[in-house]
Amino acid sequence: MNPIDPVALFRLSVLGPLVSREKLERGESKRLTSEISARAYAIPGSSRCHISAKTIQAWYYAWRREGLEGLIPKPRADRGLSRIPVELQEAILQAKRDNPQRSVRQILRVLQAAGRIGHDELSRSAVHRLLQHHGLSARLSQDGPVQERRSFNAEYAGSIWYGDVMHGPRISHEGVTRKSYLVSMFDDASRLVAHSAFCLAETALDIEGVLKQALLRRGMPLKIVVDNGPAYRAQTLQSLCARLDIHLVFCRPYTPEGKGKLERWHRTVREQFISELDPRHITSLHDLNTRLWAWIEQVYHRSPHAGLQDMTPLARYQRDLPRIRHLGARAAQLDALFHHRVTRQVRKDGTVSYLGERFELPYELAGQQVRLVVDPHVQRVIGAESTSGEPLGEATVLDTLANTHRRRRTLPAEPSVTPTGSGPNLIELALQKHPLGGNSEPSGSPRS
């Protein structure tokens, strides 16, 4: 005896309240169908849990016509055929063959940008069926193994930002091929990218540079969640956040459960941005970043997001603008907050060194230990201060040529000290112990 199709058995169990009645009164079929469709089911081979009333009606009439056989799934008569025009089919297939990493959504965006189709002219399912029929539906993924994530949402934009680094493409920099790193600050509630930039390293200085631009553009978050790496543990970053009343929260090592949305952002960058880059147009880090910023503002921020009930990240962020903590008067002090302090010993000629360059300080500081106030993002020395934080003056780039004509100043001489005490004197004691006493002259000494 052949086994009964499990899908047919499932459908029959769903229809139980309908098929168990010998006779349905007027209006009872509609009422029962509505009740059945309101329930949740473990549907075989599907992640959905609800069945539409229309589908239930179709199953019911198929059962009435053919019994259990009518509930067995039948292949579509048009399986393998596509209603998409042949010319457009070729464009879809070519777009996928040109870049196998493209998703269905990305292919539709490419065709729309090229003017081949209008908005919502093609459904994603139709494109997927076409790719599946031609064996092109599989998408190459660069992601690592899927890890369990805890799902939550911040209530308002600006409540939680995430900071992280993603390995980027290799680029040419000053004639040398270098690896790039994408440093990002990402808002939890709106999925808005506060700021993101490709850098040539993933140091604390690179992270601070991206954070500074994010603060200028999107205000101050209440909390920034980062991983436990040394770049985020840097004292300069922690001090900066403390001065701005931003809580810097570190994930436990190897358990980045709280940054699932940021990992999804990285995946979007790989699928929609990096996969579309034309290396012929990327000759520097600047070229790469200008394209990144254009794509973020013109495409990503303006695209409906499923996790936001199809709102765009920009619209979701703008909804909470009244709650955002703006810099206000702190904007004028922001550069100073990002300055670093490095300790130096002032040479006798009144100079100190920083990044291979020499700077002059007020000559009174010669021989003293000072702290240089520097802007590391532009590699500029601002001035000097004492170890207790008191300003000591400006630091100027050493100009040895100008110093040949500069009038020298003399430091005040230390006052001479004449011994006046009546206690023991080392020289006098030595003289008393000398064999000649203190009054005799050695033989052969000249006489007056």
Image (cartoon, helix red, strand yellow):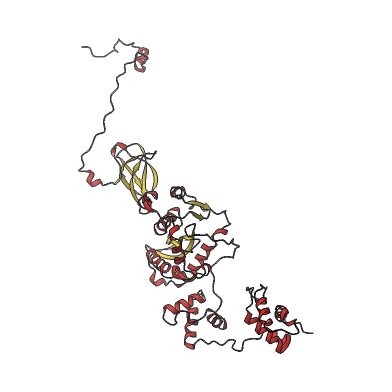
- Residue 426, image quadrant: top left
Residue 180 appears anywhere in the view: no
159 and 127: which is toward the camera: 159
Q: Where on the picture, by quarter, is residue 317?
A: bottom left
Total of numbered circles in the picture? 0
Q: Residue furthest right?
A: 1
**Residue 385: horizontal and vertical position, in percent?**
35, 41
- Would residue 225 be visible to someone looking at this image? yes
Q: Position of residue 312 (x, y in %)?
A: 47, 68
Q: Is residue 172 left or right of residue 65?
A: left
Q: Position of residue 185 (x, y in %)?
A: 46, 59
Residue positioned 59% across, 88% down in the render: 78
Residue 10 located left or right of residue 332: right
Work out which quarter of the rendered image holds the C terminus and state it: top left
Residue 319: x percent and y percent?
45, 63
Q: Quadrant of the N terminus?
A: bottom right
Q: Which one is in front, 234 or 307?
A: 307
Asked if residue 50 is positioned above or below residue 69 in the image, the reply reads above
Above or below, comparing residue 429 to residue 227 in the picture? above
Residue 11, by quadrant, is bottom right
Outermost residue to the front: 26
